[in-house]
Amino acid sequence: MKRTTIALSIILLILVATYFFFQTSGREPDNIFHLEDPSLVTEIEMEKVIRGQPVGKIVLTKNDTGPWMVNGKHPAIPAKVESLLKTMTQIRVRSSIEKAGQRSGLQLLKKNHTRVKINGEDGKIKEYLIGVTDSKHNANLMMIDGAEKIYLVGKPGFTGYISVFYSTQILEWRERTLFDLTPQNIKQIKIAYPTTPEEPGFELRREGDLWRLGEDVLATTDQTSTYIGLFDGKISAESFANDEFPEIRDSLPYRDPDVIFDYETLHGEKGSLKLFTRPENLNNYFGYLEGKPELYTIQRFVMDKFLKTRSFFAGDVVSKQQFSEQ
C-alpha cells in the first residue's frame, strides 16, 4: 500500500510538471522591461521623438545630499520621481504583438516614441522605447533598445497607459515650492495688504519661547498657537505661468501686490512672496517670489488660511509690561 501511494505521488508530480511545461513553453518572461532595484538608479534620461524628430528631453539626476534634479538645474518633485521609479519596477508585458503586426508596429514605434535610459553608478541598467497606446488605452507599445521585437506593456492594477509617467515636459517635473515652514523653524512671519490699507497686516516674531506681535506687544498662546500650527511643511504653487502669461510676469513688478507674505526661518532662510488677485479667476492668485523669475498660479484655498489680519490676534495679546506682571 505504501509503495502504491508513493508511486501515485510520483505520477501526480510528473503530470503537474508536464502541465506547467506545456503551459509556459514558448512564453517569454513578462518582466523584461521592469526594474529590479530602484535604489541603484542614479540617472534617468527621457527623450521624446515625434515623426522621427526629437522634440523634448529631460535628465533626472539623483543627488545624494538633496532632491533629484531636473536637467541639473532645478529640484524635482519628489513624489513624481518616486512614482516613476515605482512604475519602472511594476511594468509587465501584457502580450506580444502578432507576427503580422510586428513590422508596422516597429515602424510606428521607431518614428514616435520616448526613449528611456536608466543609468546607475556602473553604467546603463536598462534602455527601452515607449510608443503609442493600444486601442483600449491600457498598454503601450514597447521595445528593448537594440531589439527588433515589440510588446504591449502595462502596469498591473493601473487603468490607463504607462507613458503618462514618462513625461518629457520639464515644468511637470520641477518643484513648485513657495515656502517650507513648520512651527519649529519659523522665526518671523510678516503679512501686508498694500492695496487695502483698511486691512492691517501683522508681524509675528519669535522671542525665545514667546511671540512678539508688533514692537511692544507680546502675543499669548491661544490664537498664536492656532496660527503657527497652520504651517505644516511645503506649500506649493499650482503651476508655472510664464509661458502662458508672459505679459503678466513683465508687468507685475510695476504693480502694488495685493498681499506681501514675508518669512524668515531660524536657519536664516528668508523669502518674500508677492500675490496678485485675478479678477477673471477668483479662485486663484498670480504670484512670484522676490528675486526669482518664475510666475506662478496659486490656489486661494492653499494660501488664504495664512492670510490673517491683526484683528485675528486681537483677543490674544498683552503689552510687554502686562505680560511681565502676569
Image: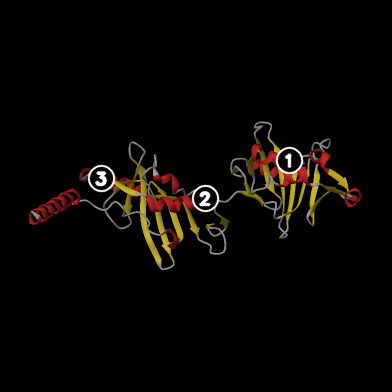
The location of residue 22, given as percent across then percent down, is 15, 50
Compare marks 1 and 3 and give the one earlier in the sequence: 3
- Inspect the image, locate mark 1, and give the three-letter code of the amino acid beneath it: Leu
Compare marks 2 and 3 and give the one earlier in the sequence: 2
Q: Nearer the viewer, residue 323 or 65?
A: 323
- Inspect the image, locate mark 3, and give the three-letter code of the amino acid beneath it: Ile
Q: Nearer the viewer, mark 1 or mark 3?
A: 1
The location of residue 48, given as percent across then percent down, is 43, 50
Name the residue: 50% across, 60% down.
61
Which residue is labeled 1 in the image? 307
Mark 2 to mark 3 CA distance (whole Å): 33 Å
Which residue lies most toward the front here? 1
Q: Nearer the viewer, residue 59 or 206?
A: 206
Compare marks 1 and 2 and give the one earlier in the sequence: 2
Which residue is labeled 2 in the image? 79
Is residue 293 in sight in this rendering?
A: no
- Inspect the image, locate mark 2, and give the three-letter code of the amino acid beneath it: Ala
Answer few, some or many: residues within 10 Å of disc 2's Cα (few below 14, many 20 plus, some between 14 and 19): few
Which residue is labeled 3 in the image? 97
Asked which secondary structure carries label 2, the reply is: helix
Q: Is residue 200 left or right of residue 251?
A: right
Q: Nearer the viewer, residue 62 or 209?
A: 209
